[in-house]
Amino acid sequence: MGLTSAITGLPYVGKTTLFNLLTGAHAATGGFAGAEAETNVGVAKVPDERVDRLAPLFQPKKTTHAEITYRDLGLAKPAAPGQAISAQKLGDLRTADALVHVVRAFADAAVPHVEGTVDPARDLATLELELLFADHAVVERRLERLEPELRSAKGAERDAKEREKAVLEHARSALDAERPLRDVDFDAEELRVMRGFRFLTLMPTLVAANLDEADVGRPDTVLAPLRAATGKHRATAVVPVCAKIESEIAELPPDEAAAFRADLGLAEPALDRLIRATYELLGLISFFTVGPDEVRAWTIPAGTRAQQAAGAIHSDLERGFIRAEVIEWEKLLAAGSEANAKKQGIMRTEGRDYLVKDGEVFHVLFSV
Ligand SMILES: Nc1nc2c(ncn2[C@@H]2O[C@H](COP(=O)(O)OP(=O)(O)O)[C@@H](O)[C@H]2O)c(=O)[nH]1
Ligand SMILES: [Mg+2]
């Protein structure tokens, strides 16, 4: 199960520049035609110091970080509200697990701005309205089709369709009031009914504010209005980036890059910031498996039980799950080896209902 984030935003805001930075790709930037036409797809390795520090203990043949796929999906400037996003783009956006909405906060006379002036809060509102219109259209279309279906349906099928209608009407009233669906208190059953529609305003959303070089060291004036706008919404966070300088820094040798970043007041690379925010937004955690063959990070939702977590590794491990041996990664690191950890009695045995915690190392015992 790989995670996919869709990068979206108006033209000329730095989407492709950010995509290249995150995935190490070299897709062409700056072209308007490309903004709507092409989709760039790339994979980023989830930076995780814990994997890097555990690996030397095992000298494994392979060290595997978690991965996240980024899809860079350009959009045209809306000619009129509700007309900016092609059906194909909408479909592409809907396949993602989260949205990264890039807004332009950099001034650069050489880079055209579709609205003429730099105003990231305005651009954020413009695109959010587009996503809202898109969801509204989906709801309307489905409600229209439900009417004749309801007339002919009977029994349990009819009940299910009545339920669907009620849920969609609930969604429509929120969208009519320009409320993104992630702000609405749907219950688990309603969310289940809505899952198949893959509503865009239901998706966790990261707003990547693409800062001007001059603002990197003092981002708060730029971020404050964006945070005021996003603070009203659930599952929404703002992450500052400076796609252009950070791309230049990424070309430097690691120690020079770190020094350069520190000078600018950037504590860590854009990828680390974005991915941490993505995990937080989506409620994801990591656990690890270790051994001479592979040291590897796995991504699961917080609150996953040990048996299901084993299924992230392989379905046989879930099916034949007996128990797991568990240790926090720092304790394993301190012990120096699993043999030592066992001798010290700090490896625990946990059953299938154990709730896996972030940073734990797992050995699954199973039999199929
Ligand atoms: N000054 C400045 N220019 C940037 C920044 N990010 C991107 N650009 C430039 O803006 C132009 C459009 O960038 P691009 O990534 O193609 O934007 P997209 O249309 O959103 O994919 C390119 O010429 C980039 O070099 C930035 O942080 N600062
Ligand atoms: Mg682009």
Image (cartoon, helix red, strand yellow):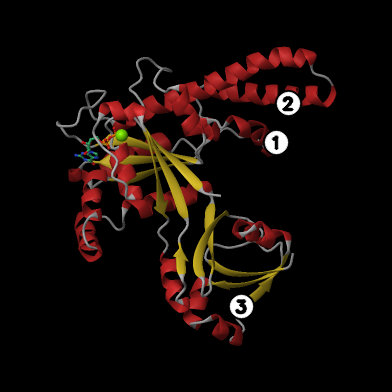
| Residue placed under numbered mark 2 in the picture | 163
Residue 283, given in percent of the width and then of the height, sits at: 54, 50
Residue under the image location 42 percent in, 72 percent down: 53
| Alpha carbon separation for disc pair 3 and 1 | 39 Å
Mark 2 and mark 1 residues within 8 Å of each other at the beta carbon: yes
Rate crowding at label 3 as few (under 14), some (14 to 19) or many (20 or more) other CA atoms within 10 Å.
many
Q: Classify the position of the C terminus by image quarter.
A: bottom right
Residue type, label 3: Met
| Residue 312 picture location, percent across and down | 60, 56
**Mark 3 residue CB less than 8 A from any atom of ligand 1:** no
- Where is residue 231, by image quadrant? top left
For label 3, the residue is: 347
Q: Nearer the viewer, residue 255 or 218?
A: 255
32 or 155: nearer the viewer:
32
21 w.r.t. 363: above or below: above
Q: CA distance from mark 2 to mark 1?
A: 10 Å
| Res. 308 in view | no
Front residue of 14 and 58: 58
Side of 67 relative to 189 (left or right):
left
Of the residues under marks 2 and 1, which one precedes in the sequence? 2
Q: Residue at x 46, y 71 (%)?
A: 61
Mark 2 closeness class: few <14, some 14–19, many ≥20 residues within 10 Å: some
Q: Residue furthest bottom?
A: 343
Q: Earlier in the sequence, mark 2 or mark 3?
A: 2
Image location (x, y in percent) of residue 298: 53, 59
Q: Nearer the viewer, residue 155 or 186?
A: 155
Split into quadrants, the picture shows ligand 1 in the one at: top left
The residue lying at 48 percent from left, 51 percent from top is 279
Quarter of the image for residue 363 reads bottom right
Q: Which mark is residue 189?
A: 1
